[in-house]
């Protein structure tokens, strides 16, 4: 059986257009274009229309035009403009840091820790300890000396969620004596002018014929502070990006559909605040139907205002007793000026816009806004939805970042004799332990999980993992505690059951006796 060779990657529409030009077709005529554009959506079978209503244009709605090739859709200009707006919103709209913070909290928490899974138990302990020592020291694992590896995990989780991509370079340092990681901002990858880009690079990335990245062009500071570029091999660059299209090289922020709604939220919030300040002030006017406007006033602080002819036109008395009381001219009456703005409808519209922003990113609205409005089963369903989202983000981080760093660091340690060789050929086999899972009913959930554990429907690994813990250290610690308890009780001749009574209904170890097996009658 013959196998197909690798083909150069290209956009479908670009190839189709090339075939049309080769056949002598220059596209539809002007009359054809008009017929398509004016097709009625209510009569799809009409001449010039389509059997798909969505394929017809209508003056009743906005006309949509979108590129069908990745390199046109994900261009440098659009990516940078959207990134600027997202960062501006993050700096000025509290909703954005809240969403990022929730992702960092529930995806990474205080860290996602390695749990080696090789058959070499001793090596597992040594490798985990070596990696932990390296990851905890920011001056060793970080070229900038700014973040530990666990803080770096949270940085990548939050910024990948908000910006769509992050960059980390694996470098070596003779000063640190260990491999290090160096962060690059997404604006520093292909951040120069297009006219200054190196030949073959598209938005900071050079790819082969199959669109596999080979090199990245990053901006760095030169010897005297000037900005220059340097090429980094794709084997050393960790580029966290989740591709939406074939042949896509760079990412646009997932907040792209939410940028304009988020700006609307800022504008609406400003209007609500301005209206609240204006309409919550209580104005009171006091006047007289006839005669002069009072002799001394309510507080004896009346003032007379005269016109150009010297005649008294108005008398006024201003003082503060929780409000401003003003005496106006003659023949006027008392009025209290109030307002009911902002209205409940406007506040509900604001929440509607915020809900739409959450929908664009996949982060459940209840986790961002107010989970207290839900109750019972509804809250549990919302938390399950949120946990599914966080698990997906965590899996992506583990597969594309954590595991790659683990393999790189451990391989370097074994090569440099920091760590002995593993007896298991699958030395890279490793799992990652993240934070505790979300729950709305800890008491009920904990008891149900214990019941499943003791009935054999669950295991220690998954049971402890749901609480963000590794089972083996926890069980070993429990064994040490019980050994110490028994030792101390033996010294004092005290029954351990008096300190920690057995749960009612359970059989104590001393009372548990094996059943007598019946004799075989054939013997």
Image (cartoon, rainbow, N blue to C red):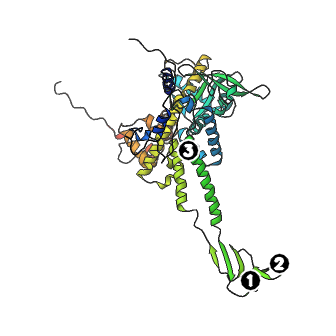
Vertical placement of residue 350 versus 460, above or below: below
Which label lies toward us, 2 or 3? 2
Q: Which residue extends farthest front? A: 31
Query: Foreground: 461 or 90?
Result: 90
In the picture, which quadrant includes the N terminus? top left
- Pick whichever of labels 2 and 1 is earlier in the sequence: 1
Q: Position of residue 58 (x, y in %)?
A: 46, 44
Query: Foreground: 124 or 358?
Result: 358
| Residue 411, quarter of the rendered image | top right
**Is residue 480 visible in the rendered structure shown here?**
no
Q: Position of residue 90 (x, y in %)?
A: 63, 44
Which label lies toward us, 3 or 1? 3
Disc number for residue 258: 3
- Pick whichever of labels 3 and 1 is earlier in the sequence: 3
Q: Position of residue 139 (x, y in %)?
A: 69, 30
User: Residue sitting at 48 percent across and 55 percent down?
Assistant: 373
Disc number for residue 297: 1
Query: Foreground: 110 or 260?
Result: 260
| Disc 2 to disc 3, C-alpha distance | 60 Å
Which label lies toward us, 2 or 1? 2
Judging from the image, what secondary structure is the residue with disc 3 in? helix
Disc number for residue 308: 2
Q: Which residue extends farthest top? A: 1
Judging from the image, what secondary structure is the residue with disc 1 in? loop
| Disc 2 to disc 1, C-alpha distance | 24 Å
Query: Foreground: 466 or 36?
Result: 36
| Residue 350, quarter of the rendered image | bottom right
CB-based contact (under 8 Å), mark 2 and mark 3? no
């Amino acid at each position: 059986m013959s196998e197909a060779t690798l083909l150069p990657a290209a956009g479908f529409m670009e190839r189709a257009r090339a075939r049309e030009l080769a056949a002598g077709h220059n596209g539809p005529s002007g009359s054809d274009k008009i017929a398509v554009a004016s097709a009625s959506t209510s009569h799809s079978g009409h001449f010039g229309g389509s059997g798909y209503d969505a394929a017809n244009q209508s003056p009743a709605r906005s006309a949509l035009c979108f590129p069908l090739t990745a390199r046109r859709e994900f261009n440098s200009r659009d990516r940078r403009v959207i990134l600027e707006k997202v960062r501006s919103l993050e700096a000025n709209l509290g909703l954005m840091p809240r969403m990022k913070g929730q992702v960092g909290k529930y995806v990474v928490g205080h860290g996602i820790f390695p749990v080696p899974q090789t058959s070499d138990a001793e090596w597992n302990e040594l490798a985990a300890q070596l990696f932990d020592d390296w990851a905890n020291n920011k001056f060793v694992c970080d070229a900038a000396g700014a973040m530990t590896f666990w803080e770096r995990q949270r940085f990548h989780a939050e910024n990948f969620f908000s910006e769509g991509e992050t960059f980390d370079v694996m470098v070596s340092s003779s000063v640190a004596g260990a491999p290090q990681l160096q962060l690059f901002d997404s604006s520093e990858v292909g951040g120069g002018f297009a006219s200054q880009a190196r030949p073959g690079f598209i938005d900071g990335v050079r790819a082969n014929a199959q669109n596999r990245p080979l090199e990245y062009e990053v901006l760095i500071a030169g010897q005297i502070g000037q900005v220059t570029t340097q090429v980094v091999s794709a084997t050393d660059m960790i580029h966290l990006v989740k591709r939406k299209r074939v042949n896509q090289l760079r990412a646009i922020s997932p907040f792209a559909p939410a940028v304009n709604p988020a700006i609307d939220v800022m504008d609406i919030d400003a209007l609500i605040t301005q209206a609240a300040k204006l309409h919550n002030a209580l104005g009171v006017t006091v006047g007289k139907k006839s005669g002069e406007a009072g002799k001394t006033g309510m507080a004896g602080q009346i003032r007379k205002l005269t016109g150009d002819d010297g005649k008294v036109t108005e008398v006024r008395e201003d003082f503060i007793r929780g409000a401003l009381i003003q005496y106006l001219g003659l023949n006027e009456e008392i009025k209290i000026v109030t307002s009911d703005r902002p209205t409940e409808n406007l506040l509900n519209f604001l929440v509607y816009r915020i809900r739409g922003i959450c929908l664009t990113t996949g982060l459940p609205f209840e986790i961002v806004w107010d989970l207290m409005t839900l109750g019972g089963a509804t809250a549990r369903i919302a938390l399950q939805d949120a946990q599914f989202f966080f698990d997906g983000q965590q899996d992506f981080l583990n597969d594309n970042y954590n595991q790659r760093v683990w393999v790189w660091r451990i391989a370097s340690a074994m090569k440099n004799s920091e760590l002995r060789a593993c007896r298991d050929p699958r030395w890279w086999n490793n799992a990652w332990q993240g934070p505790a899972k979300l729950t709305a009913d800890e008491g009920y959930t904990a008891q149900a999980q214990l019941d499943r554990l003791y009935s054999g429907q669950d295991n220690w690994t998954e049971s402890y993992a749901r609480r963000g813990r590794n089972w083996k250290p926890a069980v070993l610690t429990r064994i040490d505690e019980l050994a110490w308890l028994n030792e101390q009780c033996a010294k004092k001749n005290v029954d351990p059951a008096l300190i920690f009574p057995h749960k009612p209904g359970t059989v104590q170890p001393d009372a548990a006796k094996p059943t007598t097996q019946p004799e075989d009658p054939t013997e």
